[in-house]
Amino acid sequence: MPFKDRIAFLTSPQQVDQFLAAHKAAVIFKAGTCHKTPSSFEHVQRQLEPREDVAIGVIRVVEARPASDHVESITGIRHESPQLILFKSGKPVFDRDNWDIDEESLAEALEDHVSSVPG
């Protein structure tokens, strides 16, 4: 399935909960309006495009503040944007924000926390 078709846009706390419950491995990317968001998402896309075993949820923070606040509430990870949080079995195992979202750290996190599911 193409990467863009695998993205779930999360707008409510209920959608966040359902998304995390439905996927053993998932990433939530909080997209802000600053200039860092597009370049950060490019790093995420390059790492996750070949990883169909990792679900991708995007929260557009300006339009979906309740969903963003809920993620902060359930994880204890202070909100930033852009922000990336990797979940395994519904629990956060890795997070980065702003310029710290890069391909190398995400690749390492995926290797450390998420075994690739054979196709």
Image (tube, rainbow, N blue to C red):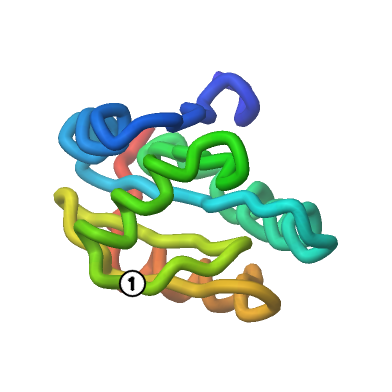
Numbered marks: total:
1
Residue at the spot x=54%, y=77% of the render? 105
Whether residue 17 sits left or right of residue 65 in the image: it is left
User: Measured along the vertical axis of the image, is residue 83 above or below residue 21?
Assistant: below
User: In x, y percent, where is residue 17?
Assistant: 21, 36
Residue 84, horizontal then vertical, whole percent: 49, 61
Which sits in the foreground, 117 or 57?
A: 57
Residue where numbered disc 1 is placed: 77
- Up/down of 106 relative to 89, above or below: below
Image quadrant where one finds the C terminus: top left
Taking 114 as reference, is 91 left or right?
Answer: left
Element class at badge 1: loop
Quadrant containing the N terminus is top right
Q: Amino acid at mark 1?
A: Ile
Q: Would residue 24 appear left or right of 109 to someone viewing this image?
A: left
- Compare residues 88 and 58 and report the one nearer the observer: 58
Q: Residue at x 33, y 72 (%)?
A: 77
The structure residue drawn at horizontal position 20% and vertical position 57%, both measured from the top left corner, is: 74
Q: Is residue 93 above or below residue 31?
A: below
